[in-house]
Amino acid sequence: MNYQQFSSIQLDALKEIGNIGAGNAATSMSGLIQKKVDMEVPSIEIVAFDDVMEMVGGPDQLIVGILFQIHGKAPGMVYLLFTLEEAESLVKQMTNMDGISFTPDGEQNELALSALQEAGNILAGSYLSALSDFTNINMQPSVPHLSVDMAGAILTVGLLQISEVYDFAIIINTKINDTEDNNQGINGQLLLLPSPESFTKIFQALGIQGK
């Protein structure tokens, strides 16, 4: 299976589900931080593995990654990726704490780490919930595993597990907007890596065939 097998209709369906998941996530996030936020999915892309690293700044780029295993009838993996600056800004909005730092050699604040994991739970959980509702296929995220490291180290484990079967990832670009401050938009990338049989189940359930 390769990424060129996907049709524009299939991508549009995944994007629309992403928008619904983003709307659900915005509602949950607003309740958590007691501030109105808006979320959107400006784009969704199918990207070859060779290009995934470059999209996050190269294998040596320091990033924050939150990994979830997808349990249920359509297993796979989900990565939620932020730059250090985006992760720090998100946690600051959630906790009102200053001086948040996710540099690997810095002192990690447990509250900040917990807040970021909770944000990951909301974002990944909302998307998988929307996907489950549309397909009637049970998909549940695992407990999140958070890492602050170079992109190559964070992504290689997941990509190696999948690369023997296919060579691409679905990248769902997500933007989190603070409606009270237009300068506080935060961009994150959600990488969806279903198992090959899960792709078939998802598109069959949506009634969408390939090209």
Image (spheres, rainbow, N blue to C red):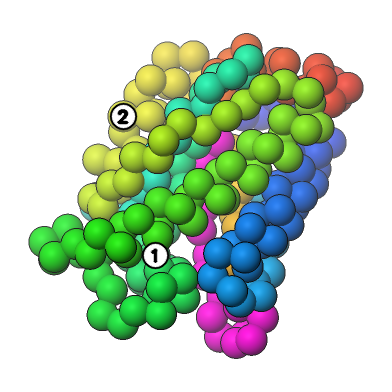
Residue 78: % across, % down: 50, 36
From the image, state whether disc 1 or disc 2 is nearer to you: 1
Q: Does residue 160 show up magenta in the picture?
A: no
Viewer-proximal residue among 174 and 95? 95
Residue 27: % across, % down: 69, 61
Query: Is the N terminus in the top left, top right, bottom left or bottom right quadrant?
Result: top right
Q: Amino acid at mark 1?
A: Ala
Residue 138: % across, % down: 67, 22
Q: Residue at x 59, y 74 (%)?
A: 34
Viewer-proximal residue among 12 and 75? 75
- In the figure, 112 relative to 162: above or below? below
Residue 200 relative to residue 125: left or right: right
Q: Secondary structure at mark 1?
A: helix
Q: Amino acid at mark 2?
A: Val
Q: Residue at x 44, y 21 (%)?
A: 162
Figure quadrant of residue 154: top left
- List the residue tagged with mark 2: 157
- List the residue tagged with mark 1: 87
Q: Is residue 17 at all visible to an observer of this figure?
A: yes
